[in-house]
Amino acid sequence: MGAAGVMAGARTPRPVAPPMAMLAELTHRCPLQCVYCSNPVQLVARSAELDTRAWARIFRQAARLGVLQLHLSGGEPLLRRDLAELVRVASEEGLYTNLITSGVGLSQRRVGELKDAGLGAVQLSFQAADPSLAREIAGGEFWEEKVAAATLVREAGLPLSLNVVLHRHNLGQVRELMEMADALGAERLELANTQFYGWALANRAFLMPDRATLERAEREVDAFRARGSSLEILWVIPDYHEGRPKPCMGGWGRLQLTVAPDGRALPCPVAYVLPGLDPPLATEATLDWIWYDSPAFQRFRGFDWMQEPCRSCARRFEDFGGCRCQAFLLTGDPEATDPACAFSPHHERVVAATSPHRGLDAASPRPSPASSPRPAKPLYRTYP
Ligand code: SF4
């Protein structure tokens, strides 16, 4: 069906619930160069980014579709000069907005503008618990600005959550990270073990933690939770080490959708890697058609597409066979069982990727970025 037919198309029966959340990747541009970035290795150029009117139209459609939460992300969304305008449109449509940011470029004036526009909450990224390691991971001096951004958010009365991507260079700092988040007044801390897509997959050997350090970090999290702190800790599982896959996106086309900086609508932020997916453009088709009827969003809905062992496995209702993008990236088959699963015939590929660092124990020196092979870095700074 062409785009014109899509716009005027008759409604079909709806066995699928509307999405709860939408991730709007406003830009891929970013002042940081984090080596674990899950953005595509082929970044969308500034010249291809949607303009204010196009995003506003998408946000209105999202609200009509039933979306409740709008996550404004990037790259660095603060690089969009129209950010407050976009927040205002979304708020007027009744969407709860959450800004996902590095904090770089967040002045008192901008916080005020965003709050006045109706911004609901801020999620701030940190790379480490100390400025030195943070500098090495992010590729520059951003520490002071991030700490200042946390203060500005709290002073503005906005809910603050922190996000830290964990890997072998900062996993040993989990206790300090939790204490830092508490001291900065965060309500929530997301400790997100690296998911290996995009730049993170390119830098997998540099980032891969060892099991002993992971287990120590988990014990630290349990001990911190047992202290009864009001800080909510979310621990995103390191699926390479768990023998079980993550229930990616809570199921394909089931809870949320992503719109990339150029308007491609995707069931998950990484799904552009899947061959033949042909993501629909939110500038050409309605979000309603995209969500309910587009082939891209139907492709892995439900369970009929599954191969064995998923097809007859009781856990398929909980994990949906794992991540389609990871299955494709590691096996070449997007319908394969996610190799993170111990039942996958390709599970040894994941085990092999974790093995270079097996054997490190408490007595081993913590590996440092300086002593590791140099990683590839996203070259956002060269972007116009
Ligand atoms: Fe999940 Fe498939 Fe593994 Fe079963 S075989 S646990 S459904 S990924």
Image (cartoon, grey):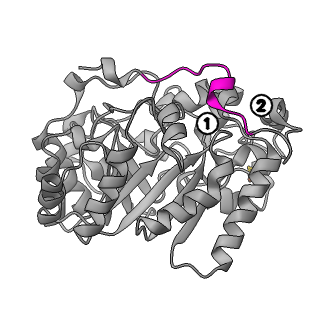
Between the residue at mark 1 and the residue at mark 2, the CA separation in whole angstroms equals 11 Å
Q: Nearer the viewer, residue 10 or 129?
A: 129
Residue drawn where x is 47% and y is 52% of the image = 253
Sequence-first disc among 1 and 2: 1
Where on the picture, by quarter, is residue 150? bottom left
Which of these two is toward me, 96 or 15? 96
Residue 196 image label: 1
Q: Which residue is mark 2?
A: 353
Left or right: 150 as drawn, with respect to 318: left
Total numbered labels: 2
Name the amino acid, label 2.
Answer: Ala
Tell me the quadrant of the picture where the C terminus can be found.
top left
Identify which residue is drawn at 70% across, 27% down: 205
Local packing at callout 2 (Cα closer than 10 Å; few below 14, some 14-19, many 20+) is: some
Q: Are marks 1 and 2 in contact (CB under 8 Å)?
A: yes
Residue 130 place in picture, x, y as percent: 52, 47
Where the N terminus falls, by quadrant?
top left
Q: Give the SS element for disc 2.
A: helix
Which portion, as a residue range, is magenta? 366-378
Residue at 15%, 41% in the rendered image? 54
Q: Is residue 136 above or below residue 187?
A: above
Q: Residue 17's spot in the image, x, y percent? A: 42, 65
Residue 67 visible, this angle: no
The amino acid type of the residue labelled 1 equals Phe
